[in-house]
Image (cartoon, rainbow, N blue to C red):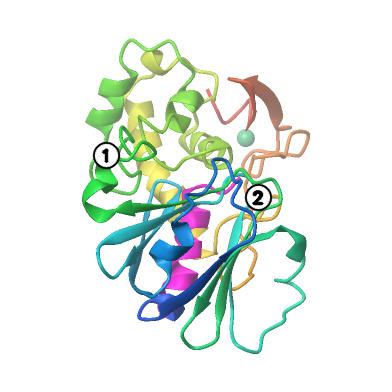
Amino acid sequence: MPELPEVESLKNSLAPILVGRTIVRVVVVEPRLRRRMARDFAARVAGRRIERIERRAKYLLIALAGGDILMIHLGMSGSLTYRDRNSHSGAIDRDPAHDHVVFELDDGSRVVFNDPRRFGLMKIVPQAKLETVAELKGLGPEPMGSGFNTDYLRAKARGRRVAIKNLLMDQRIVAGIGNIYASEILFRAGVRPTRRAGRLARAEIERIVRFTPEVLREAIGVGGTTFNDYMDGRGREGAFRPQVYDRAGEPCPRCGVTLRQVIVGQRSSFFCPACQK
Ligand SMILES: [Zn+2]
């Protein structure tokens, strides 16, 4: 499931080719995504110029001329890929049966939203209402911004019995972190995923806060992680290799002790029993 680094990589791959282009036509083949797309979606998007592309949490936000935002979430298996006028790349066109939405641009190129499991989301929101839209309202700070700091996380963890990994994955606490990066951050910080958030020492919170942007930036730098089927706007897979995620039974890359798996909040978590206390 794409997390912040994957959506950021998607943004970085699409922005240079899409900003300034006009969407001339939208073909909605299958409107039944996580929620049904609005009936007037295509009509509201057609004819609009793309002014900029941003990201908030795991949402891609495409700003259209006239003040609307095209908001996209990839769900479990979604992809948004660019095809130039002549491109029929086999790698990108691997699953045309699940091409649900096609955006045709003014130079003959296209952007295709493909989503086999249809947990994705696509909607139009007026710019002025963006902060209050249900999906974004109540989200915590961005983990690479100044709002996510030791004092903040300490205040949020205080008195909480929840496992620290679940706290990091709680989008109301901090936005954009999912199962893969929560595991990686806690490994670097030397904290077990099962520890109760309220029992962590200040130094441990400090390390988590310090390693969070470090892990995320490292992943963004190599285009994110391709665990199942993530690809960026150019059809490229991410090259980030998790050190502990999905590596139970393998030796810890730092100390060689066998990595373990534990279920935390119904999700698999991975940790080193020696490096993480
Ligand atoms: Zn270790």
Seen from the viewer's position, the closer of residues 277 and 29 is 29
- Along the line of sight, which residue is nearer the eye, 140 or 97? 97
Q: Which residue is mark 2?
A: 77
Q: Residue at x 59, y 73 (%)?
A: 234
Provide residue 49's location: percent of width, then percent of height: 35, 75
The three-letter code of the residue at mark 2 reads Ser
Q: Residues within 10 Å of mark 2 (few under 14, many from 20)?
A: some
The magenta stretch is 1-16
Three-letter amino acid code at the position of disc 1: Thr
Looking at the image, which residue is at 76% across and 61% down? Answer: 97
In this rendering, the answer to whether 165 lies above or below 148 is above
Magenta residues, dominant SS class: helix
Element type at mark 2:
loop
> Element at badge 1?
helix
**Figure check: 90 above or below 157:** below
Q: Which mark is residue 132?
A: 1
- Could you tell me residue 169's position as x and y percent? 47, 32
Task: Please determine whether, in this image, residue 199 is positioned above or below residue 110.
Answer: above
The answer to if 102 sits in the magenta stretch is: no
Left or right, 112 with respect to 131, comes to: right
